[in-house]
Image: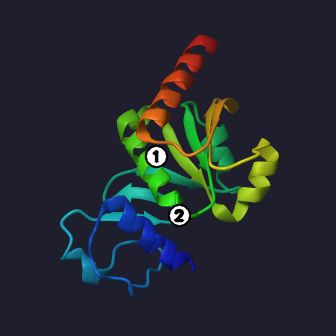
């Protein structure tokens, strides 16, 4: 039930303690009923995680946009490969932190669950969650397992050093 996952993600990411359990979302975490009640509103949609009025922080990657968002860009890309299970909202929150701390120097995304199995096969991913770093259409580094801010931050630093050495 995709709408329920969006509610769980929004709740976990933003710590909103509100009783909107019956709220049905149609793609975005913004409804006219909520807009006046929440001071800091963020959007979670199929296009990714954004602040209202800002560029997307975390892109949802699918076969349709994989080339444009991962392979054709000239900056490093951090990509999460993980099903939408109970740990997914926490990993997205950590990705958001990395996206904000890296600024525009690194693109951040997660694989769309509908294409997860096919992309796992192509990228030879044996377990999830897996974090991947791509740079100029080449996989630079990968890390298997759940991450906290420190672990993912260290993984990013190590990967960025590898990129500087190789290029």
Residue in the foreground of this view, choosing between 63 and 123: 123
Residue 161: x and y, percent? 53, 17
Residue at 34% x, 73% y is: 30
Residue in the foreground of this view, choosing between 139 and 157: 157
The residue that mark 1 highlights is 95
Residue at 32% x, 61% y is: 14
Residue in the foreground of this view, choosing between 27 and 82: 82
Residue 27: x and y, percent? 48, 74
Position of residue 139 in the picture relative to residue 85 (left or right) = right
Contact? badges 1 and 2 (CB < 8 Å): no
Residue 64: x and y, percent? 69, 57
* Quadrant (top left/top right/bottom left/bottom right) for the N terminus: bottom right
Location of residue 63 by image quarter: bottom right
Nearest to N terminus: mark 1 or mark 2? 2
The residue that mark 2 highlights is 86
Position of residue 162 in the picture relative to residue 35 (left or right) = right
Q: How many marks?
A: 2
Residue reaching furthest top?
Answer: 165
Few, some or many residues within 10 Å of mark 1 (<14, 14–19, 20+): many
Residue at 77% x, 43% y is: 123
Residue in the foreground of this view, choosing between 42 and 121: 121
Spatial CA distance of label 1 from label 2 is 16 Å
């Amino acid at each position: 039930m995709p709408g329920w996952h969006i509610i769980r993600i929004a709740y976990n990411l933003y710590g909103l303690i509100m009783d909107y359990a019956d709220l049905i979302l149609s793609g975005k975490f913004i409804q006219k009923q909520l807009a006046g009640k929440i001071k800091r509103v963020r959007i979670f949609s199929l296009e990714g995680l954004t602040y209202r009025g800002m560029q997307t922080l975390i892109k949802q990657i699918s076969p349709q946009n994989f080339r444009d968002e991962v392979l054709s860009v000239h900056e490093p890309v951090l990509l999460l490969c993980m099903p939408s299970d109970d740990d997914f909202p926490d990993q997205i929150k950590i990705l958001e932190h990395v996206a904000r701390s890296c600024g525009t120097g690194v693109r951040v995304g997660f694989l769309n669950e509908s294409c997860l199995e096919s992309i796992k096969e192509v990228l030879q991913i044996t377990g999830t969650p897996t974090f991947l770093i791509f740079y100029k259409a080449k996989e630079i580094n990968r890390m298997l397992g759940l991450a906290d801010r420190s672990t993912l931050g260290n993984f990013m630093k190590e990967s960025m050093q590898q990129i500087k050495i190789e290029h």
